[in-house]
Image (tube, rainbow, N blue to C red):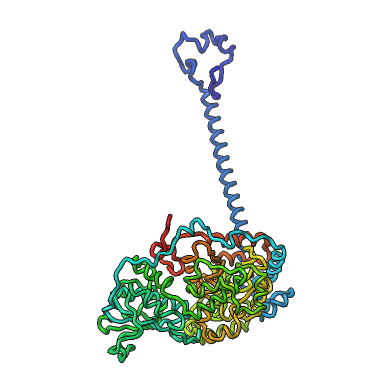
């Protein structure tokens, strides 16, 4: 049955049969069309008028519907943005309160925490909430979680093996002939602590090869921060350094006689002042062509040049393949600690692993040397009976934690850690003495507020924040924790939360007897070398500040020699800060889940990003070879 158009009326039967004024019916096929009697199929005027009205009605209805829809969409978007704005406002107020907090609150603070703070009450805007920076509520929840004694997650002590095992050390491979060093001699006096000095040494080795110069054994600058007069030979094996790098560069112990009497300050000492760069000064992260253009002419003219400082003065990219490989070769193969540091380091590792179940890890021989490494699997008769008894009930696995919370780090960060006016005065005084340039800048230029620094993840983790991270990750209460670091700001009181939740926490000072520790006292760089060994050999290593040189070098060493079996925990401080800011309201299971997710994302195995340190990220074709 055919469908008729809805706007065409059907004529009724009586209209077809009834004639008008004797005229035949309108639809008679005998007559031609007229304006009175149109042919069948053409609409009549009445039909045309009705169709127009109907079309106008439809058009009007459509326009009204479109307008109504548009208004509805606008209302919905308005409500969405209003709700979003309200939520962000509440979140912002909460963050300001929490970040600016670290101030005294009205409820009682636990005894093991309250003694660490000299706090004052502060009000921020309309918010009446207060926070003293000690995470009392979260630490209580963490203690409850540890009491449940849940099984540790498998990934705590593992790396993503399939990807990690594909990378093998190969920086020892060479594809060039030795240089004769005929262009002159390079001297360097490296500043900073042991880890900055290590980086400077490997960088100067590359510069010596680049300029075809002979390198004089590096010297270390006495720092008023580190107060350590140790020189290269007190920390590293000189003979091994010279011999191992002999196929690459010529290394001598001192200048030849004819050059010793020269005034090195007058003929080409390059001082690095961050606010002044001349044609003989080296900018930070300088590229190889800078040395060829500006330093080589001085070397040709004077036959000797003396670098003073040399902190981060060589770029990682762009860098020729063989020079980058030389950098890795120096760091991972040429710099071995002297035997007495290796032997004492082996004692620390053995006691941490438990003397009754010691073993050799993949990097032990490279880190400790064959002789000291072999002692790890022998009975240590020198261990006192009390220490042997204590270690017999503890797992051989241990976690190393580099708690970068010394006063120099705390002062330089410009952050606030809940110590009130007393803390601020103490850190200001320290900056004036040890970081005068920074102290002057803080008075003449506008710096980000402590709140902004913390939000951006630029503040070092406190001991309280570090222990919350460890508990959330799933390390059980019996875990043996080795804490590396010099003098933690706040002392033992600041460590109270950490030692309370993890009673098997030790330091090198607790592991070694006074007589074993005596040769290293007053030598902070040598003590830092012992921390390096304790952290590098750990079954798992956790850092609290990814910008720390020790953490960077240790994590790189573990990647290079660890065989894909030595995981490193690198917290993203910015993400962790967002999570910790909710410490007064967040549920423990939510906190745990978010922390684990944040850390899991940092454990991915990937090649070194362009421009990043080969000492920290050795997974690159210059340092390691990939089997896949």
The residue lying toward the viewer, choosing from 249 and 141, is: 249
The residue at the point 56 percent across, 20 percent down is 9
Furthest toward the right, the residue is 108
Quarter of the image with the N terminus is top right
Residue 128 sits in which quadrant? bottom right
Q: Position of residue 196 (x, y in %)?
A: 45, 77
Q: Report the side of 274 relative to 140 (left or right).
A: left
In this rendered view, identify the residue nearer to me: 463 or 26: 463
Q: Residue at x 49, y 59 (%)?
A: 164
Percent position of residue 289, x then y: 30, 71
Q: Is residue 162 toward the left or the right of residue 325 in the image?
A: right
Above or below, comparing residue 67 to residue 246 in the picture: above
Residue 411, how many percent across, how many down? 54, 80
Q: Reply above or below: 621 against 246.
A: above
Give x and y (percent) for residue 305. 32, 83
Can residue 355 be spotted in the picture? Answer: yes
Q: Is residue 46 visible?
A: no
Please name whichever residue, 330 or 568, is drawn nearer the observer in this view of the structure.
Answer: 330
236 lies left or right of 263 = right
Number of labels in the image equals: 0
The residue that appears at 51% across and 20% down in the rendered structure is: 44
Q: Quadrant where the C terminus lies?
A: bottom left
Using the rendered view, name the quadrant where residue 288 is placed: bottom left
């Amino acid at each position: 049955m055919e469908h008729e158009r809805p706007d065409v009326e059907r004529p009724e039967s009586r209209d077809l049969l009834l004639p008008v004024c004797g005229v035949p019916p309108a639809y008679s096929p005998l007559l031609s069309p007229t304006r009175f009697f149109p042919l069948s199929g053409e609409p009549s005027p009445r039909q045309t008028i009705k169709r127009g009205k109907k079309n106008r009605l439809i058009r009007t209805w459509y326009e009204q519907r479109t307008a109504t829809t548009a208004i509805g969409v606008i209302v919905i978007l308005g409500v969405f943005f209003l709700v979003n704005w309200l939520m962000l406002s509440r979140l912002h107020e909460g963050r300001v309160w929490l970040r600016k907090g670290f101030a005294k609150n009205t409820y009682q603070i636990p005894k093991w925490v309250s003694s660490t703070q000299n706090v004052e009450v502060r009000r921020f805007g309309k918010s009446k909430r207060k926070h003293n920076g000690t995470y009392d509520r979260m630490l209580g929840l963490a203690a409850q979680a540890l009491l449940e004694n849940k099984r540790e997650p498998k990934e705590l002590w593992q790396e993503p093996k399939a990807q990690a095992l594909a990378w093998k050390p190969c920086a020892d491979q060479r594809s060039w002939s030795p240089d004769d060093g005929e262009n002159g001699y390079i001297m360097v006096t490296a500043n900073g602590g042991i880890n900055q000095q290590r980086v400077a040494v490997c960088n100067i080795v590359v510069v010596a090869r680049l300029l075809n110069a002979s390198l004089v054994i590096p010297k270390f600058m006495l720092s008023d921060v580190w107060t350590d007069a140790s020189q290269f030979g007190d920390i590293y094996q000189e003979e091994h350094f010279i011999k191992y790098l002999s196929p690459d560069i010529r290394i001598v112990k001192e200048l030849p006689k004819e050059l010793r009497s020269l005034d090195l300050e007058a003929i080409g000492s390059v001082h690095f002042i961050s606010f002044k760069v001349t044609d003989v000064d080296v900018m930070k992260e300088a590229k190889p062509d800078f040395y060829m253009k500006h330093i080589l002419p001085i070397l040709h003219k004077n036959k000797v040049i003396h670098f003073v400082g040399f902190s981060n003065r060589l770029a990682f990219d762009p860098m020729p393949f063989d020079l980058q490989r030389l950098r890795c070769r120096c760091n991972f193969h040429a710099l071995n600690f002297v035997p007495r540091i290796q032997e004492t380091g082996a004692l620390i590792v053995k006691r941490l692993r438990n003397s009754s179940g010691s073993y050799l890890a993949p990097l032990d021989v490279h880190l400790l040397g064959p002789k000291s490494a072999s002692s790890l699997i022998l009975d240590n008769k020198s261990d006192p009976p009390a220490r042997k008894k204590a270690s017999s009930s503890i797992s051989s696995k241990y976690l190393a934690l580099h708690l970068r919370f010394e006063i120099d780090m705390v002062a330089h960060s410009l952050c606030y850690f809940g110590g009130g006016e007393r803390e601020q005065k103490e850190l200001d005084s320290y900056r004036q003495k040890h970081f005068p340039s920074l102290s002057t800048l803080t008075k003449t230029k506008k710096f980000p507020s402590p709140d902004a620094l913390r939000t951006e993840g630029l503040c070092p983790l406190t001991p309280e924040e570090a222990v919350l991270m460890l508990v959330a990750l799933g390390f059980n209460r019996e875990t043996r924790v080795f804490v590396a670091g010099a003098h933690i700001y706040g002392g033992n009181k600041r460590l109270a939360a950490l030692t309370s939740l993890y009673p098997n926490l030790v330091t090198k000072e607790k592991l070694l007897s006074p007589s074993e520790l005596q040769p290293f006292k007053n030598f902070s760089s040598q003590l830092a070398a012992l921390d390096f060994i304790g952290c590098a050999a750990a079954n798992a290593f956790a850092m609290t500040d990814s910008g720390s040189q020790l953490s960077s070098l240790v994590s790189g060493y573990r990647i290079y020699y660890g065989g894909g079996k030595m995981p490193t925990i690198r917290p993203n401080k910015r993400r962790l800060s967002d999570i910790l800011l909710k410490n007064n309201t967040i549920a423990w299971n939510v906190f745990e889940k978010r922390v684990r997710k944040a850390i899991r994302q940092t454990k991915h195995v990937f090649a070194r990003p362009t421009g990043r340190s080969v000492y920290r990220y050795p997974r690159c074709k210059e340092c390691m070879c990939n089997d896949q």
